[in-house]
Amino acid sequence: MKPPVFEYHRPESLDEALELLATLSDVKILAGGQSLMPMMNFRYVMPAHIIDINRIKELGEIHRVHDGVKFGAMARHDQAKKSEIILEHCPLIAAGMEHVAHAQIRNRGTIGGSLAHLDPSAEWPALLAVHDATLRVQSKSGERDVPILEWSQGFMTPNLVEDEMLTEITVAIWPEKHVYGFAELARRKGDFALAGAAVLLDFDGEVISRAALALLGVEVGPIRMIDAENLLVGEIPSDELFREAAEHVTVVAGIDDVHASASYRKKVASVMVRRALEQASHQHKSQALAA
């Protein structure tokens, strides 16, 4: 099956794209197309207009800024995986990209596209949640910033209105020697995860001084496990501590679908939390031995 007829627009600038969004109705934005095009071919979505933003070059850049790292919404998954800026300042994001689909999709898929599609099992929302990301959305009439934990408004429903588009994402940078972990379970390599966890830890000597822990695939949007984070801070890593932190997954409601039940997803997420915490702890031990 192929998509029904639509009108195609290819703006050369952000202003031109925002003007189109303000004047057209029944519009979809084409970024990497890795989700939109299959959905159109199956006629799950049938927009009257497509706005292709691939020629807006400023949306495809990754910059170091004074308060963090800024991603243009059109930056590709593979670009984030290989960026020297990301490898130096946000290595968890680069590690998470290893789990995103396959090489062909990473080469075309975009950060903004993933966030706008907002599949519950996508890696980007959880990776951005532990970095306390802020998402900037723009329209012809203005712009606003949305904290990552306010981005999901329901199942595959981002915090966007019809004439707005996501243009950039800014993440906070952790201290230089912070450690990280990422773990997920998928039926096959490259599939969307049934559940997963992203972790950032900072240490004062042997004691955890700061923690950020987010889940993916368990709820409709990313979840920060604040109680588990508070449990970790002030403690020395141990198997018992990590098991106790992972038990906080049980308070999450969870989602059921054709792939897995809510209870199964939560059990998997609990295991993924422990694995991600163990990865981070092993990094810290390696840093201590190398010092």
Image (cartoon, grey):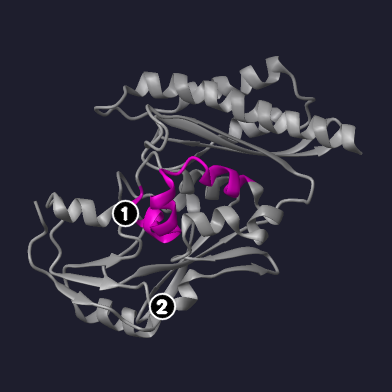
Q: Is residue 210 visible?
A: yes
Q: Could you say whether the residue bearing mark 2 is in a helix, strand or loop?
A: loop
Q: Could you say whether the residue bearing mark 1 is in a helix, strand or loop?
A: loop
Q: Residue at x 26, y 73 (%)?
A: 51
Q: Residue at x 27, y 76 (%)?
A: 21
On the rendered structure, is 114 left or right of 273?
A: left
What residue did someone put label 2 on?
56
Q: Quadrant of the C terminus?
A: top right
- Whole-percent x and y of residue 17? 32, 79
Q: Considering depth in this image, is 225 or 82 the residue closer to the camera? A: 82
Q: Residue at x 10, y 56 (%)?
A: 2
What residue did someone put label 1 on?
34
| Magenta stretch, residue numbers | 92-118
- Whole-percent x and y of residue 213? 59, 37
Q: Is residue 133 visible?
A: no
Circle 1: residue type: Gln
Q: Considering depth in this image, is 287 or 207 the residue closer to the camera? A: 287
